[in-house]
Amino acid sequence: MVPEARRWLELMLGASRLSVPDDTQATAVLLCSEAATNAVVHTASGRQGTFTVHIRAIPGHLTVEVEDDGAATNPVPVQAGALDEHGRGLALIASFADTWGPRALGCGIYYTLSWRPAPLDM
């Protein structure tokens, strides 16, 4: 379901009237992919569960939440070794997002991205 989540977010951001810049859209989709993959690999969502992607957007600001079915611990970035095949998802999110963390309500994580909105034509 991770590819479907990426495609859905691409469609939603592309259809938005908020003029989300292309680089911000690409970053949002990359981080969504990482968050959704973490949900599948590290939470009950990967064991016959589900995850849900929520977005909230206003001019210049986007919040994406990936709600999952829960895990025994909160998400924490780890220091991946040079040859490790896993362990970089939350580090990517932490590096590229303006803010991120566990969802305030329910299980999963959120991240925010900002950009300078285009001036309004009058």
Image: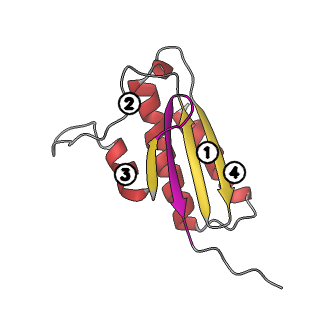
Q: Which mark is residue 69?
A: none
Mark 2 → mark 4, Cα distance in angstroms: 28 Å
Task: Determine the residue positioned at 71% across, 65% down.
Answer: 18
- Image coords of residue 109 (percent x, y): 48, 38
Of tags 2 and 1, which is closer to the observer?
A: 2
- Image coords of residue 48 (percent x, y): 52, 14
Quick one: 102 or 23, which is closer to the camera?
Answer: 102
Task: Determine the residue positioned at 40% across, 49% down.
Answer: 93
Give the magenta part as a residue range.
102-115
Identify the residue under disc 3: 94
Identify the residue under disc 1: 7
- The reply to whether callout 3 and callout 4 are in contact (CB within 8 Å) is no
Q: What amino acid is found at the position of numbered circle 4 in the picture?
A: Met
Q: Earlier in the sequence, mark 3 or mark 4?
A: 4
Q: Is 86 placed above or below 70 here?
A: below
Q: Give the quarter of the figure containing the N terminus.
A: top right
Q: Earlier in the sequence, mark 2 or mark 4?
A: 4
Q: Is 55 placed above or below 38 here?
A: below
Q: What amino acid is found at the position of numbered circle 1 in the picture?
A: Arg
Identify the residue under disc 4: 12
Q: Is residue 23 left or right of residue 87?
A: right
Q: Give the quarter of the figure containing the C terminus.
A: bottom right
Q: Earlier in the sequence, mark 4 or mark 1?
A: 1
- Image coords of residue 116 (percent x, y): 58, 74
Q: Secondary structure at mark 1?
A: helix
Identify the residue under disc 2: 74
The furthest residue to the bottom? 122
Quick one: 34 or 3, which is closer to the camera?
Answer: 34
The furthest residue to the front? 104
